[in-house]
Image (tube, rainbow, N blue to C red):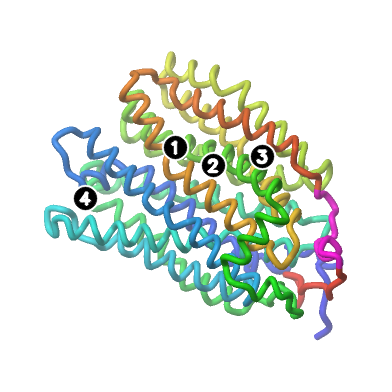
């Protein structure tokens, strides 16, 4: 059958299952992110029991952060591998490793049964998962950009972010229904394990579909693409150092926003004193905003450019965060929690959609996957794994319930300034940017 180009077929329309398979890894990341934050207290009690409940919670959040240690390594190793061997084999490796890490957490008996060995097993599981997640976003996002038509790259790439919203919404709905069926006590005891197992269940489907995707990395070889991970990192720092610093700061602000959002169930329960039923439904508001607004952000980025969509939603977060959390503290109701969560998530999601396309567009193909992977993994490892711990620790030490707002505003100011200094990549030719004209990569709509 003759090959069809995305420009003539609408790209995304005919190959939704291919896009779903590509973004599945990102969805699993956020599903795990949401579920872990959601059941941090129960996981802490299972593996790190303590006399003081706050010590158990903080130990659980520390375990959550341990996985982020491996993300930069995964970004360098797997990202460079994707630039050398192709996007598809890298995406198969990451999703398989991700499933192994989640499975180890879901099936490992608690401290009461295995003692310190249980802690060792779940730590290893989180490290494996961190390695996989560090290398996931670069190859999968590069694939979407290279397979999408130029005029729709923002919208197609925005599905990376929208998939996170789908995962969070699914997690919130299932957790709420399961809590109603088996009760709060059972959810804290063993129900949270079912939540992880449900996420792992979609991995085989993702592996099958990903294995049949066309490759987009290009057939011609570049000496840098065959170099070691260390050499690739050296080239990135030498040739694109300023860009990497700016994108690191932009992603850091987005990561802190996401972390504040996923911490809202803990904040609602532990800080505001709301019931578990109310707290368990918070991810529904988070997920709802994170589905529609990334697509809006991608659509806008294709029409007015990447930089405006990276800047203005972040500026609005700076203006809205303090009043929103002040109102939430003064009126600690279910409606207030859901409203604040939805508002901040919506603004952050619009912003994130432009970020996820602008960074790889600014890099040449031979280091595109590695560059995005490293920046994303390093930023997320430092701030995604620490934000929940830091804000809860600040609240515990200072007693100031506005700690999340202070943290969010500070990083949003930095992210806004960095975005202003970023280059505009709207409409950029991904191949000519390297100084050579390559054969067009296969589209998601190609048969």
Q: Nearer the viewer, mark 4 or mark 1?
A: 1
C-alpha gap between disc 3 and disc 2? 11 Å
Q: Is residue 289 magenta?
A: no
Q: Is residue 298 shown above or below 25? A: above
Counting residues from the start of the chain, the first of labels 2 and 4 encountered is 4
Q: Position of residue 64 (x, y in %)?
A: 36, 48
Q: Which one is closest to the eye, mark 3 or mark 2?
A: 2
Disc on res. 255: 2
Rendering coords of residue 10 (x, y %): 80, 63
Q: Which residue is mark 4?
A: 47
Residue named by callout 3: 351
Q: Are marks 4 and 3 in contact (CB under 8 Å)?
A: no
In the depicted structure, whether residue 223 falls above or below residue 385? below
Q: Residue at x 51, y 58 (%)?
A: 134
- Where the C terminus falls, by quadrant? bottom right
Local crowd size for mark 1, using a 10 Å CA cut-off: few (<14), some (14–19), many (≥20)? many
Q: Which residues are magenta?
A: 425-435
Q: Position of residue 46 (x, y in %)?
A: 21, 49
| Label located before the other in sequence (4 or 3) | 4
Question: Please, which residue is most extreme toward the bottom here?
Answer: 1
Q: Secondary structure at mark 3?
A: helix
| Front-lying residue, 357 or 374 | 374
Contact, mark 4 vs mark 1 (Cβ under 8 Å): no
Instruction: Identify the secondary structure beneath mark 1.
Output: helix
Q: Which residue is mark 1?
A: 387
């Amino acid at each position: 059958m003759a090959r069809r180009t995305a420009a003539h077929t609408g790209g995304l329309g005919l190959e939704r299952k291919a896009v779903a398979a590509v973004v599945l890894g990102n969805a699993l990341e956020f599903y795990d992110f949401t579920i872990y934050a959601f059941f941090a207290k129960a996981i802490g009690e299972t593996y790190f029991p303590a006399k003081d409940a706050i010590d158990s919670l903080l130990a659980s959040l520390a375990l959550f952060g341990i996985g982020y240690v491996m993300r930069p390594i995964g970004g360098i190793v797997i990202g460079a591998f994707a630039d050398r061997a192709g996007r598809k084999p890298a995406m198969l490796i990451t999703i398989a490793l991700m499933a192994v890490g989640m499975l180890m957490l879901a099936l490992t008996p608690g401290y009461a049964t295995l003692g310190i060995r249980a802690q060792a097993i779940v730590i290893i599981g989180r490290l494996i998962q961190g390695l996989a997640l560090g290398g996931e976003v670069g190859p999968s996002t590069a694939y979407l950009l290279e397979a999408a038509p130029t005029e729709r790259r923002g919208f197609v790439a925005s599905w990376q972010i929208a998939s996170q919203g789908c995962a969070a919404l699914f997690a919130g709905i299932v957790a709420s229904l399961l809590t109603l069926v088996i009760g709060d006590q059972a959810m804290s005891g063993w129900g949270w394990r079912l939540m992880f197992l449900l996420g792992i269940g979609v991995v085989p489907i993702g592996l099958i579909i990903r294995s049949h995707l066309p490759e987009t990395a290009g057939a011609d070889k570049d000496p840098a693409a065959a170099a070691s991970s260390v050499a690739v990192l050296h080239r990135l720092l030498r040739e694109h150092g300023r860009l990497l610093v700016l994108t690191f700061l932009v992603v850091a602000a987005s990561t802190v926003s996401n972390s504040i959002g996923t911490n809202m169930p803990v904040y609602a329960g532990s800080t505001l004193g709301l019931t578990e039923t109310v707290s368990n439904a918070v991810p529904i508001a988070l997920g709802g905003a994170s589905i529609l607004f990334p697509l809006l952000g991608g659509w806008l980025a294709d029409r007015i450019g990447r930089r405006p969509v990276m800047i203005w939603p972040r500026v609005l977060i700076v203006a809205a965060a303090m009043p929103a959390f002040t109102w939430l503290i003064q009126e600690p109701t279910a409606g207030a929690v859901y409203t604040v969560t939805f508002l901040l998530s919506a603004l952050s999601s619009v912003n994130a959609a432009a970020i996820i396309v602008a960074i790889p567009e600014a890099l040449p193909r031979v280091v595109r996957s590695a560059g995005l992977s490293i920046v994303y993994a390093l930023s997320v490892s430092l701030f995604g794994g620490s934000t929940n711990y830091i804000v809860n620790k600040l609240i515990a030490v200072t007693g100031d319930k506005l700690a999340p707002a202070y943290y969010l505003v500070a990083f949003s100011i930095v992210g806004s300034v960095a975005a202003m200094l970023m280059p505009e990549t709207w409409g950029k030719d991904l191949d000519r940017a390297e100084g050579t004209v390559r054969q067009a990569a296969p589209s998601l709509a190609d048969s």
